[in-house]
Amino acid sequence: MRIPMKKILLLLTLFVSQAMIAQKTRPPFFKAPEGMQLLSTDLHIHTVFSDGSVWPDIRVQEALREGLDLIALTEHLEYQPHKKDLPHPNRNRSYEVASAHLGSNDLLQLINGSEITRNMAPGHINAVFVQDANKLLHKDSLTGIEEANKQGAFVFWNHPHWPAQRADGIARLDPFHEDLIAKKLLHGIEVVNELTYSEEAFQLALDNNLTILGTSDIHGLTDWLFEIPEGGHRPMTFVLSKDSSEAELKKALFKGATVVWYKDMILGKPENINAVVRHNLSAASKGYMPNTSIAQVALTNHSALPMQLEYLGPLSFQKQSRFITVPPYETLMFEIRTKTQVEALTLHFKIQNAWLGPKQNPILPIKVFL
């Protein structure tokens, strides 16, 4: 049975409208530090205009459904496996199609990008906030990267741990990358790509003052790859920005003000991770149990991340061990033995699933007034 085109268009409209309503009503992934915004982004995405499997409008609809603030379409410049079926000399076309579909919707920002696709070194390099992707298509990778910088693009190294280009899966710099960093032509590095995480890339970012990024690098459907209907999510880079304008977001990216959310963990530079953790975990006193020195405390998680905590202090808990998990957007009640009744208590927790360097967790002191 053939479905009338008007009905198909109506169903698509309802689909997008429901996604918009869901985005407006869902709580923020993370509570932003005071005076700042935490903008959820995915800066590495593909469609049929390079080696992806979907039309650009699907990428827009996925992002709206998942609550992202900004995405970049980053088609391969050189690698065009669908060109026999979809010849397109204009490398901006994916962005143009997606922009037309998004229209004036202010729930999602869309920016133009490209993936310079080369053997190692330099490997695959993304440029976002590009003005004209066609001008990045050069015979050699260096002039393409230089052109991206001339356009004011933010440039980062994709999946430096990809086994197809690093057989041992270890991210490391080649002289080419060192030269790019020295000349300030390379600004960031993917520490998380799709389903993978690289501690070595994390350390490279810290050692070379590169912006830390996590992206989906999605080619198929995000629902399938990241099991979103079952509660999963794509990797996201959260940008700590003064506001949601493109200018401020771009400035924050160059500054390195990012936190990556990957599976059930977050990672980033110490100043960024500490700020986010501090604003997403709070405690309140519920007083002492009658006729005891056992304090009752409510620990609240304001984020979508299950906070996995280890208590580091000398006191003991009444019902829990020193290991506590506070589920997303929930409050956990616990009792702690203070030996004598006190007016205030400082609890030190190690956040076991937050990382400010390879194998380095933040320690958060929380003061509770009893």
Image (spheres, rainbow, N blue to C red):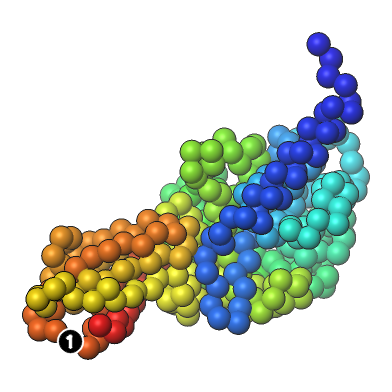
Residue pictured at 50% horizontal, 76% vertical = 272
The count of marks equals 1
The percent coordinates of residue 104 (x first, y second) are 86, 57
Q: Amino acid at mark 1?
A: Val
- Residue 179 left/right relative to 285: right
- Residue 161 left/right relative to 25: left
- Residue 98 left/right relative to 261: right
Q: Residues within 10 Å of mark 1 (few under 14, many from 20)?
A: few
Q: Is residue 357 visible?
A: no
Q: Tell me the SS state at disc 1.
A: loop
Residue that mark 1 sits on: 342
- Residue 183 left/right relative to 84: left
Residue pictured at 64% horizontal, 76% vertical = 241
Q: Is residue 89 visible?
A: yes
Front one among 326 and 363: 326
The percent coordinates of residue 318 (x first, y second) are 13, 65
Front one among 240 and 189: 240
Front one among 41 and 90: 41
Residue pictured at 65% horizontal, 53% vertical = 23
The percent coordinates of residue 324 (x first, y second) are 26, 61
For residue 10, above or below residue 250: above
Residue extending farthest to the bottom is 343
Residue extending farthest to the front is 290
Front one among 287 and 64: 287
The percent coordinates of residue 25 (x first, y second) are 62, 55
For residue 343, above or below residue 155: below
For residue 171, above or below residue 100: below
**Where does the N terminus fall, quadrant-wise?**
top right
- Image-quadrant location for residue 280: bottom left
